[in-house]
Amino acid sequence: MIRTRPMLPDPDDEMVLETAINGRADAIVTFNDRDFRPVAARFRCSVVRPGEVIRGLAEETE
């Protein structure tokens, strides 16, 4: 298990980042992309906003 703390400005977000890294997530979906993007990139995890996910899903169903 990788412990990444502290890496984000908001200590409450650390658990989200740590879970994504340890779960080998491809992406973190959040409105807070500004804080997550630089750190998540170090772990090859992309950060996307909820609207991007919804648009992507809509395009897949067309």
Image (cartoon, rainbow, N blue to C red):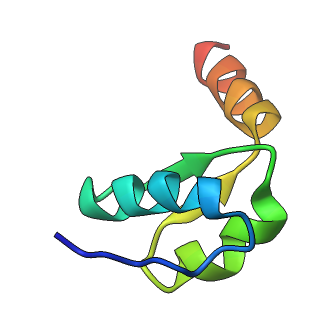
- Horizontal side of residue 37 vs 18, given as left or right: right
Image quarter where the C terminus lies is top right
Q: Residue at x 48, y 67 (%)?
A: 45
- Quadrant into which the N terminus falls: bottom left
Most distant residue in the bottom direction: 42
* Residue sitting farthest toward the top: 61
Q: Nearer the viewer, residue 27 or 58?
A: 27
On screen, residue 51 versus residue 24, left or right, reads right
Residue 10 position in % (x across, y down): 72, 64
Residue drawn at (77%, 59%), measured in percent from left and top? Answer: 33
Q: Vertically, is 10 above or below 52?
A: below
**Whole-percent x, y for residue 39 in the image:** 60, 80
Between residue 53 and residue 20, name the one nearer to us: 20
Going 77% across and 28% down the picture, which residue do you hit? 55
- At x 50% / y 51%, what residue is drawn? 16
Residue 8 image offset from top left, x and y in percent: 65, 74
Total marks shown come to: 0
Quarter of the view holding residue 13: bottom right
